[in-house]
Image (cartoon, rainbow, N blue to C red):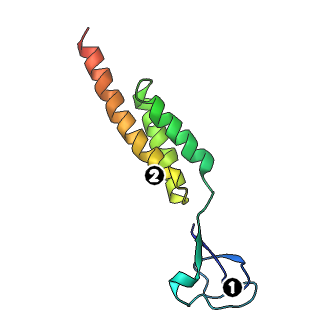
Amino acid sequence: MVKYVCPSCSAISETDKSFCPECGTSYLKKESENIKVESNEGGGLATAGLVCGILSFLLFPFVLGPIGIVLGSVAWNKGHPRGKAATITSIVGTVAGLLITIYWWNSY
């Protein structure tokens, strides 16, 4: 969720409101006057997704890969910057882990 800081009183509010809940200043000013604040929600989910994605290269790509994709996607939807990295790492880890598994399975 994207939040903004009021240019008048520095109160933090959500973007779907057109007035500051504290001082009543209109948010309909230029976009450059409002300062975006990145969400810290989903930090643990993003980290867990990143770890699952990395581990899925060599360990249980069928299990850890999808778990990492789901955790990373949820963190990404919550606005955490590492959520995208966790999702992409989990997808790459799943595909690479499956290819390594297929290669290993066919070599014996």
Quarter of the image with the N terminus is bottom right
Residue 74 — which label?
Answer: none
Crowd rating for badge 2 (residues with CA inside 10 Å; few <14, some 14–19, many 20+): many
Q: Mark 2 belongs to which amino acid?
A: Lys
- Give the residue pinned by disc 2: 84
| Quarter of image, res 47 | top right
Q: Give the image quarter of residue 41.
A: bottom right
**As drawn, is 56 to the left or to the right of 12?**
left
Tell me which label, 1 or 2, sits earlier in the chain. 1
Q: The residue tagged with tag 1: helix, strand or loop?
A: loop
Q: Residue furthest top?
A: 108
The image position of residue 34, as x and y in percent, is: 58, 80
Residue at the left extreme? 106
Is residue 74 something one can see in this rendering? no
For the C terminus, give its image quadrant: top left
Q: Residue at x 72, y 84 (%)?
A: 21
- Asked if disc 1 and disc 2 are in contact, CB closer than 8 Å, the reply is no
SS at mark 2 in the image: helix
Q: Amino acid at mark 1?
A: Cys
Q: CA distance from mark 1 to mark 2?
A: 30 Å
The residue depicted at 55 percent of the width and 46 percent of the height is: 46
Total number of numbered discs in the rendering: 2
Q: Position of residue 70 (x, y in %)?
A: 48, 45
Nearer to the camera, 59 or 67: 59
Provide residue 82's location: percent of width, then percent of height: 52, 50
Q: Is 85 left, or right, of 46 in this rendering? A: left
Dividing the picture into quarters, in which one does residue 29 lie? Answer: bottom right
Instruction: For residue 14, say whether it is visible.
Output: yes
Residue for badge 1: 20
Residue at (41%, 24%) from the top-left corner? 58
Residue that appears at 32% across and 28% down? 98
